[in-house]
Image (cartoon, rainbow, N blue to C red):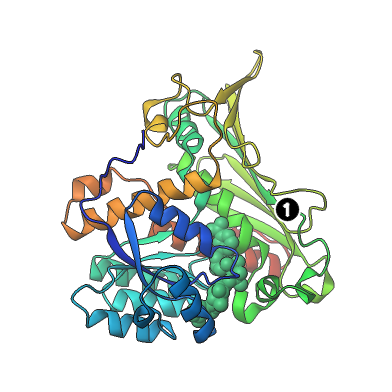
Amino acid sequence: MINGSKRISAPIRWAMVGGGRDSQIGYIHRSAALRDQSFVLVAGAFDIDPQRGRDFGVQLGVAPERCYADYRSLFEAEARRPDGIQAVSVATPNGTHFAITKAALEAGLHVVCEKPLCFTVQEAETLRELALARHKVVGVTYGYAGHQLIEQAREMIARGELGEIRMVHMQFAHGFHSQAVENQNAATQWRVDPRLAGPSYVLGDVGTHPLYLSEVMLPDLKIKRLMCVRQSFVKSRAPLEDNAYTLMEYEGGAMGHVWSSAVNAGSMHGQKIRVIGSRASLEWWDERPNQLSFEVQGKPAQILERGMGYLHASALLDDRIGAGHPEGLFEAWSNLYYRFAMAMEATDRNDAERLASLRYPDIDAGVEGVRWVERCVQSADDGGVWVDY
Ligand code: NAD
């Protein structure tokens, strides 16, 4: 149970790059990082517009001299301070992640970076090597991975409660961009511009989320090959897709499927994962995150509720309120940030045992997300052919 009692010896001095006033994702980063006093926000380069970023930082309570014009001056000036930052979160458009994360690692900082981590596997491997060489944590915000029912699913699958795993159906298919809303909305505009978004739109923007959930729930399932087709139903988005279907064959013969979409008209988030075994299936949907459906063949379906004593102990570890009250995206993110902080602390004191006990989307998860997108794009652009993973 998380109840406010501290498990981090001292809050980590933390900054943000991006996540400015009007950004979509900045607030939840701050809310999650600051909630359990694991981090303290002391600096930032919050906005592409330096003055707007400074004004906003001051409003957040950051000292004016520690609200910097850009990430380079942030890292340089903070490195000169005895009380300089120890970690930074990168919440900027995709095209800047690689350069900022690389510079942060080179400056000796732990990093939390938004997904997708970068554009190419080569870049991702560079970041992994750098993080290893500098003994730094890189966390990636696949937010719902911190929800306790994802841990419950992982534990049930590990204990064989589903039998042998046969199929994994995933989707993140919302309808918010069914029309060309980017013409009026800057935060959508960069998402359909390959220079800023990278080689894909929905594959990287949404598809990687349920993909990571499957990696948590099914750590032994390895993709052998995949095929993908992608479409731009709003034509002006080409070459980037607003809808894609990916079929995956795993080592051992299990099959998987990911539907990534921003044009599923009428759908809210539509992020779901269904794991189908020889005996039973599990299904989780982010719009009803407190319920996990457990369906044993030949028996009535059961709905497992978050916070209940019948869940596995590992799932209850991150419970914050007990059963009955909803916990959702904000709590899941807080759990992740809490784990990021614990990982940073354990890394700093070379506590390998502690590190091995922590599960969070790390640099490997970041690399895997980029690899998956790269392979999907390769398959789709070659006409929807099977591509070895
Ligand atoms: P946004 O366009 O709403 O906001 C981007 C912010 O970054 C703005 O404040 C902008 O001023 C600032 N910025 C841009 N370039 C900068 C730079 N070089 N230096 C400093 N600040 C800069 O974008 P968003 O929707 O918040 O997305 C940001 C990132 O978060 C993207 O990579 C996106 O994929 C990711 N994201 C993740 C989730 C999730 O669930 N994990 C959800 C939404 C977005």
Question: Residue 22, image x and y in percent?
Answer: 60, 70
Helix, strand or loop status at disc 1: loop
Say few, some or many: other residues with alpha carbon within 10 Å of mark 1 (under 14 / 14 to 19 / 20 or more). Answer: many
Give coordinates of residue 7: x percent, y percent. 25, 45
Question: Which residue is identified by label 1?
Answer: 174
Looking at the rendered image, the quarter that the N terminus falls into is top left
Q: Is residue 338 visible?
A: yes
**In the shown orientation, is residue 62 left or right of residue 241?**
left
- Cβ(mark 1) to ligand 1 < 8 Å? no
- Ligand 1: which quarter? bottom right
Q: Residue at x 53, y 38 (%)?
A: 327
Pick whichever, 11 or 238, lies toward us.
Answer: 11
What residue is rendered at 59% in x and 37% in y? 289
| Residue at the image position 35 percent from the left and 82 percent from the top | 65
Q: Quadrant of residue 344?
A: bottom left
User: Would you place residue 156 above or below residue 235 in this image?
Assistant: above
Task: Name the one closer to the observer, 248 or 71.
Answer: 71
Estimate the x, y position of residue 290 in percent, counting from the top left: 57, 33
- The answer to whether residue 93 shows anywhere in this view is no
- Whether 227 is drawn above or below 74: the answer is above
**Number of numbered callouts drawn:** 1
Residue closest to the eye, 85 or 112: 85
Q: Amino acid at mark 1?
A: His
Does residue 286 lie above or below 234 as drawn?
above
Closest to the observer: 343 or 11? 11
Q: Residue at x 55, y 42 (%)?
A: 328
Whole-percent x, y for residue 93 in the image: 56, 73
Q: Which quadrant would residue 242 be assigned to in this image? A: bottom right
